[in-house]
Amino acid sequence: MKNYNHTTYSILGILTTECRTGYAIKQLIDESLNHFWKISYGQIYPTLKMIVQDGLAEVHTSTQKGKPDRNEYFLTPKGRNALKTWLEEPVEQIPVERNEILLKLFFGSYQSKESTISLIEEYKQKLEARYETYKNIEHTISTYNNDASQYWLFTLDYGKRITMAAIEWCTSTLNQISV
Amino acid sequence: MKNYNHTTYSILGILTTECRTGYAIKQLIDESLNHFWKISYGQIYPTLKMIVQDGLAEVHTSTQKGKPDRNEYFLTPKGRNALKTWLEEPVEQIPVERNEILLKLFFGSYQSKESTISLIEEYKQKLEARYETYKNIEHTISTYNNDASQYWLFTLDYGKRITMAAIEWCTSTLNQISV
DNA sequence: TTACGCATGTAACCAGTTACATGATTGA
DNA sequence: TCAATCATGTAACTGGTTACATGCGTAA
């Protein structure tokens, strides 16, 4: 079976939900996956086209008065199969996430202590804001209680834990530098 | 002043050390920054060319018998300045790191419990291996004790904390799923 | 009347990877 | 003799972003 990229699988996955149009896919990602996944229309529409060409989904186009054509996509058995196969494959390797603050810190001996400190402090503030956002989303999701919500909460828990660890690193590093 | 991308600044930063050739830059990154940064020759050589064109560095070429020309790069005051300015700028926004395992987990209700569990278990093993690697590198660096080594240890500490948080998330999630 | 939501799509661009080509020296 | 190290570089490709174009309905 052909291999697709993660973007394609993310779209296949979303097509198992009620989101059927390119527009709705974008919305779902921005609302519910945005802490670990994002995507632009520039990827969505060409990918949907390819998905249909490869027989992973079918389009049903409905013309609406005053609005552009609405293309609704439905997974075919082949599409479901491709998704399932990918879901069960182990994650290849953990990617190296490029981290701008670590890059700057790596060259820390080339700049003043003060600017290093304010760099980390600003970063910490951003992390704290992010943590609050996660808590809010978590709260919203926990009121849903459908089949999928448990898994959504797992992904949020991941985000919270990682963010908290980063915040703690900021605190610890600031202490060590100030001394 | 012109803005460059992070790849360019990483090279400018490395040129403050004794690494002066494209080859040596690649080596330093692979050895010391690889847990949060990586780069390929396909980026390095064209970027070095551009850096010289923009007057951020100068090349000194030495011909060696039997080996290809060795191009050594030296930062100009303009280059040092560009680096310093960037170092002191706050980090814009924390990027969304795409996370394959969270993507798969998000569609967890579409697959069997067993395959979700083995997915997380395999991921956890990879994280544990990574943690060990970090500990080893940390041990090596702490024997150096030069000006920069303190900052290198900070970046490693970050890697360790984040990895540990992810491992704990695996454990917690596995417990919740198995119930 | 202005902006937002619905809805589709493309072209140009930027970033990054992979594979390839070259070739002498040195140590196992 | 085989692999690794030093050393440079390019071309094709994949992935992703941004900016643009279109246009009606509706609510403020």
Image (cartoon, coloured by chain):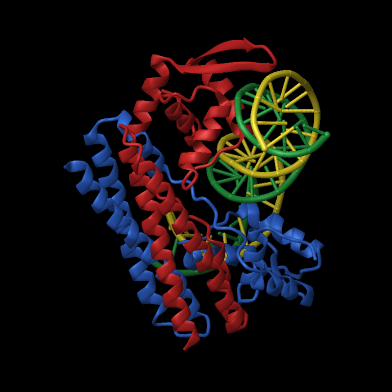
Chain colours: A red, B blue, C green, D yellow
| Coordinates of residue A120 in the picture (x, y in percent) | 53, 72
Give left or right: position of C14 versus A122: right
Q: How many marks?
A: 0
- Residue A104 or residue A171, whichever sits in front: A171
Q: In this rendering, does residue B20 appear at all?
A: no
- Residue C25 or residue B146, whichever sits in front: B146
| Residue at 59 percent of width and 58 percent of height | B93
| Residue at 56 percent of width and 38 percent of height | A39
| Residue at the outermost left position | B179
Give left or right: position of B45 versus B123: right
User: From what the image shows, is residue A67 above or below residue B148?
Assistant: above
Q: In this rendering, does residue A134 appear at all?
A: yes
User: From what the image shows, is residue A98 above or below residue B152?
Assistant: above
User: From what the image shows, is residue A133 above or below residue A122?
Assistant: above
Figure quadrant of the N terminus of chain A: top left
Give left or right: position of B13 versus A92: right
- Residue D4 or residue A60, whichever sits in front: A60
| Coordinates of residue A32 in the picture (x, y in percent) | 46, 40
User: From what the image shows, is residue A44 above or below residue C22?
Assistant: above
| Coordinates of residue A13 in the picture (x, y in percent) | 42, 29
Q: Quadrant of residue A26?
A: top right
| Residue at 58 percent of width and 54 percent of height | B40
| Residue at the outermost bottom position | A179
Q: Quadrant of residue B90?
A: bottom right
| Residue at 48 percent of width and 57 percent of height | A130
Q: Quadrant of residue B77?
A: bottom right
- Residue B86 or residue A36, whichever sits in front: A36
